Each structure stands twice: as C-alpha cells, then as structure tokens.
Image (spheres, rainbow, N blue to C red):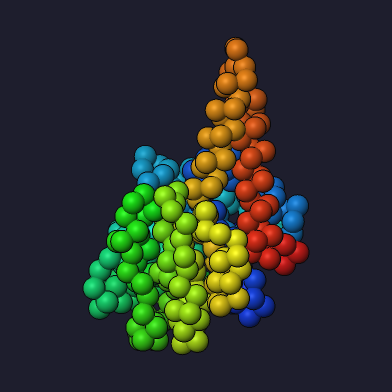
C-alpha cells in the first residue's frame, strides 16, 4: 500500500465517532514506532513533519522514509506537513510527496487567513492533497496558554465556505508542548463548532490532554488528534534510562534505541486505543 490522502480517513472517523491519531516524527525510530504499532493494531495512522525538521534536505530525507514505510505498510498511512506558515515551503511540499498539508494562518486576521488558505487549496487540490487549516489559535503550553484564541462557531461556517478546506484545526482549550497545568477543554464550544462545520475537526495539543476530555472531544467531532511531545518524552526517557544503566554504554544505535522504541510504542498504542482507531484499517 502507498501513502494515502487524509480527507477520506477523517470523514469516516467523524461519521463513525472515532479519531485518527497523528504523530510528528523527526527520525527513523519515531516513524518505526508509529508504523509498527499501527500495523499490529490495524489502525490507520498519520505521520507528520514539523517545519523545524526540514532544513538541509530534511524534507527529502523524511518524505523518502515515509514513502518507503507506506509501501511496506498494510494499513492506511498519511504523510502530513504540520504547521506550515510559508507559501514557498508549501509549494515545495506539494511537489515533495506529502499527501496532506496544514497551512497555519491562525495568527493572521480572518481575511488574511482565508486568502492564504485558498491559495494552498488551489495548489494542493489538483494533486489530490488534503488541506488542513487552523481557525482560532492554539498557543504554547510552556506558560503561554494565554496566547490561545478560541475558535468562534460563527466564523467557522464563513471560513470553510470561503476556503473549501478539507479539515479544520480548532482552538478549544489545548496547547502545544508539555503542559504546565492540566488543560480544560471547552466542550460546549466544540459541540457548537461541530454543529456548524461541514468538515472534520482537528485537535492539536493531544499530548498530555486527559483521556476523558479527549474522548468527549471525539464524541463532539474531533477526527484527528495530534501527538508529538509524549513521543519525545518517551524517547528521552528511554535514552536516559539506557545511559544510566550502563557503565560502558554500547555505541550501537540498535542498542541505544531499544528502550526508547519500547516506550514510544507504548505511547502510540495508548493513543490508538484512546482514539478508537484500532481495527479500523
């Protein structure tokens, strides 16, 4: 099976009230943990790249790995560019093999966000590439939650109609990064957004958001859950544990990453079951 667009997966998830987990990956080990567990649990899955990982041919390296993994996998795998704000980089991504892209104009005024999103839809749609946008703004968990601007239901209909975007990331109380305090999702707001949205909804800041709140969000239309920080924490925990346990640590990468892979696989499996995506492939 080769990589697939995201649109149909999210539409099915929304219709059947489950969610497709999406994991940012920066290296082979992170990608391997995601794909292997998705295969074991028969779950569709979304691999994502962050712009910070793309300089110096990073895009070429990461997309090549993902396409090879997609050819091997027997479950649907999406390759998604996460939080891109630059149209020139977006053009490069459209040509590089991404099957889904996110244009993030969430810090811009409404009309500028609309115009930027429309331009990306125009370049991606002819190639069958799914486009995600963000309305409202999801801030950072590192003490900057106040930067968040909650999504307003009355703007959702206007935005989707004006852009023809395929899915929409919404700000309803989550934040990016490792939380300094437990988030509290605005579930009534999410329900109101879902009532007026013609497209599936995306929840960013899935790492560390309490499971009960995530389940309530999925029941209210969230069809894609973004996870990054929990994978990074799991990898670091495994590396530190390996280095502390060995007086003379092995120099071989296979030994170095054995424990991180174990911990990252645990995170992936937990999120698949949280999303209810097991046996949906």
Residue 235: percent from left, percent from top: 56, 37
Looking at the rendered image, the quarter that the N terminus falls into is bottom right
At a point 39% along the width and 53% down the height, the residue shown is 141
Please indicate, yes or no, whether residue 1 appears anywhere in the rendered image.
no
Looking at the rendered image, the quarter that the C terminus falls into is bottom right
Q: Is residue 60 above or below residue 174?
A: above
Quadrant in which residue 47 is drawn: bottom right
Residue 75: percent from left, percent from top: 70, 59
Quadrant in which residue 76 is drawn: bottom right
Residue 137: percent from left, percent from top: 34, 66
At a point 50% along the width and 87% down the height, the residue shown is 195
Please indicate, yes or no, whether residue 149 appears anywhere in the rendered image.
yes
- Report how many numbered discs are placed on residues in the image: 0
Residue 40: percent from left, percent from top: 75, 52
Q: Residue furthest top?
A: 248
- Give the side of residue 170 with respect to residue 4, left or right: left
At a point 47% along the width and 65% down the height, the residue shown is 184
At a point 50% along the width and 50% down the height, the residue shown is 228
Which of 60/49 is in front?
49
């Amino acid at each position: 099976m080769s990589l697939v667009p995201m649109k149909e997966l999210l539409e099915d998830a929304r219709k059947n009230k489950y969610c497709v987990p999406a994991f940012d990956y920066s290296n082979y080990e992170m990608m391997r943990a995601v794909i292997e567990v998705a295969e074991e649990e028969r779950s569709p899955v979304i691999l994502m790249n962050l712009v910070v990982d793309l300089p110096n041919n990073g895009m070429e390296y990461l997309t090549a790995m993902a396409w090879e993994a997609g050819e091997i996998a027997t479950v649907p795998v999406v390759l998604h560019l996460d939080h891109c704000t630059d149209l020139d980089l977006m053009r490069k991504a459209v040509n590089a093999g991404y099957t889904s892209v996110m244009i993030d104009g969430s810090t811009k005024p409404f009309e500028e966000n609309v115009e930027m999103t429309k331009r990306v839809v125009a370049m991606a749609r002819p190639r069958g590439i799914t486009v995600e946008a963000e309305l409202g703004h999801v801030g950072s968990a590192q003490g900057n939650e106040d930067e968040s601007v909650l999504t307003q239901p009355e703007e959702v209909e206007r935005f989707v109609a004006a852009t023809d975007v395929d899915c929409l990331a919404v700000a309803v109380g989550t934040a990016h990064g490792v939380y300094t305090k437990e988030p509290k999702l605005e579930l009534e707001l999410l329900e109101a957004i879902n009532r007026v949205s013609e497209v599936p909804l995306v929840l960013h800041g899935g790492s560390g958001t309490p499971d009960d709140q995530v389940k309530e969000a999925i029941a209210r239309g969230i069809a894609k859950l973004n996870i990054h920080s929990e994978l990074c924490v799991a990898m670091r925990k495994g590396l530190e544990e390996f280095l502390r346990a060995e007086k003379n640590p092995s120099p071989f990468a296979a030994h170095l990453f054995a424990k991180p892979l174990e911990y990252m696989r645990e995170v992936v499996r937990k999120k698949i079951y949280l999303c209810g995506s097991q046996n949906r492939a």
